[in-house]
Amino acid sequence: MDFMDKLKNSAKNIGDMAQDLAKTAGDKAQDLARAAQEKTAYIKELSALKAEIREQAGMIAQNKGQIAEQVLALLEDGQTEFSDEIKQLANAVTLAKAKISELEAKIEDLKAEASAKNPELAQELSKAIAEIDREQAVDIKAAETAEKKADEENAAEYTTLKTE
């Protein structure tokens, strides 16, 4: 009987250990799932902030182009006074730059919050930010190149008109 009792106790101990192991594995799985949800939420918010920054940068480029066109037209006519529309466009550029600064501060706050919770999460967010920036840089560079080419053409046209 003593042998059977030992066998029962051993089986019970093995069962308890297996149950503890399963509970620990379940807790770890929940922790990993929670961390993944948290990471996803941060990346989603970062992506939205970066998209808004990109939108503001596009608005700046568009307004600068309109300002340049209007200033060139005024200069062609011999005028040195700027219209209210030009002043409004310049103000829109200033406001967009301020909005970009505000959005960048939000990104830094988000990174700091993530770092305080989990340094590994902060590193992953930094990688995600770099990837978002790389993806957006391709589009922005193309737009900047087109804008620069248009500015050069406008400058050449103005020089031609001025010399005639």
Image (cartoon, rainbow, N blue to C red):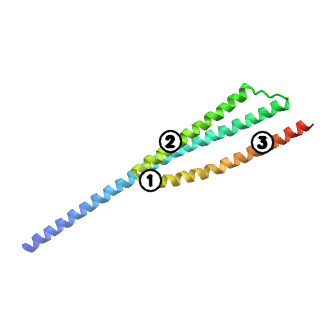
Task: Tell me the quarter of the picture where residue 95 sits.
Answer: top right
Residue type indicated by callout 1: Leu
The residue sitting at the front extreme is 80
- How far from the left and from the top, in percent, is residue 8? 13, 68
According to the picture, the residue beneath numbered tag 2 turns out to be 106
How far apart in space, not on screen, are marks 2 and 3 (Cα)?
33 Å
Disc 2: CA contacts within 10 A as few (<14), some (14-19) or many (>=20)? some
Nearest-to-viewer mark from 1 and 2 = 2
Q: Residue at x 74, y 43 (%)?
A: 147
Residue that lies at the very extreme toward the right in this rendered image: 164
Q: Mark 2 belongs to which amino acid?
A: Lys
Seen from this angle, which residue lies furthest left? 1
Q: CA distance from mark 1 to mark 3?
A: 43 Å
From the viewer's perspective, tell me whether residue 104 is left or right of residue 117: right
Q: Which residue is mark 3?
A: 151
Return the x and y of residue 29 as percentages of the image width and height: 35, 56
Rendered location of residue 112, percent (x, y) = 45, 47
Q: Residue at x 7, y 73 (%)?
A: 2
Q: Is residue 77 above or below residue 159?
A: above
Element assignment for label 3: helix
Tell me which label, 2 or 3, sits earlier in the chain.
Answer: 2
